[in-house]
Amino acid sequence: MTIKAGDTLPNATLSRMGDEGPEQVDLDTLTKGRKVVIFALPGAYTGTCTTAHVPSFIRTRDDFANKGVDEVICLSVNDPFVMGAWGESTGATAAGISMLGDPQAEFTKAVGMEFTAPPAGLIDRSKRYAMVVEDGKVTILQAEENPGVCDVSGGEALLAAI
């Protein structure tokens, strides 16, 4: 089943780079009592993800804060080392975007947003989407039909939907 607006997110243990190295974080902890934007993408360092999706949220991070968003989270089926390095290299971390990994695609599969594209070497990756989550409940979900484009899931498009 694919997640939709009105659904409550399943809890998931995600990973990130902390001051002492990799650490686990429960999604419930990040969303409980908070307004959070989560944008998910097929993979760190991939074309559209690096040149369009992440930059769109870097450009709009302050605008989301002005709309009451407590945190903007980038989620990908990658390990915390890759997500940490990618956040540094793109400027996403400096812009205040939290870079979280879903290393075994558990959350991605739980919300029905996984896809596989063997010719590109992408196995059990996340479709491209963005959502607004308020106190654990999805209020807005904008998913792309094709993982190679970033139109409805980009920062500007999601901001306009709030």
Image: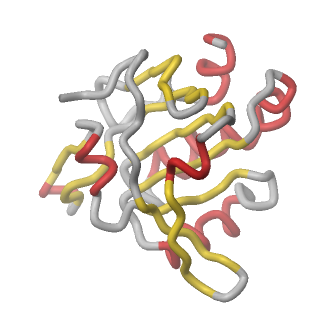
Answer with the quarter of the image where residue 147 lies. top left
Q: Is residue 149 above or below residue 23?
A: above
Q: Residue furthest top?
A: 161
Task: List x then y, in percent, for residue 35.
Answer: 67, 31
Q: Residue furthest left?
A: 118
Identify which residue, 80 or 68, lies in the foreground.
68
Q: Residue furthest bottom?
A: 20
127 sits left or right of 66 in the view: left
Task: List x then y, in percent, for residue 28.
Answer: 52, 48
Count numbered badges in the picture.
0
For the C terminus, the image quarter is top right
Identify which residue, 121 or 83, lies in the foreground.
83
Task: List x then y, in percent, for residue 127.
Answer: 32, 39
Q: Is residue 109 above or below residue 124?
A: above
57 sits left or right of 29 in the view: right
Q: Is residue 144 above or below residue 78?
A: above
Q: Residue furthest front?
A: 33
Residue found at x 67% / y 42% = 72
- Colour setting: secondary structure
Residue found at x 52% / y 34% = 136
Task: List x then y, in percent, for residue 140.
Answer: 51, 18
Identify which residue, 99 or 119, lies in the foreground.
99
Residue found at x 24% / y 28% = 2
Residue found at x 59% / y 31% = 135
For the N terminus, the image quarter is top left
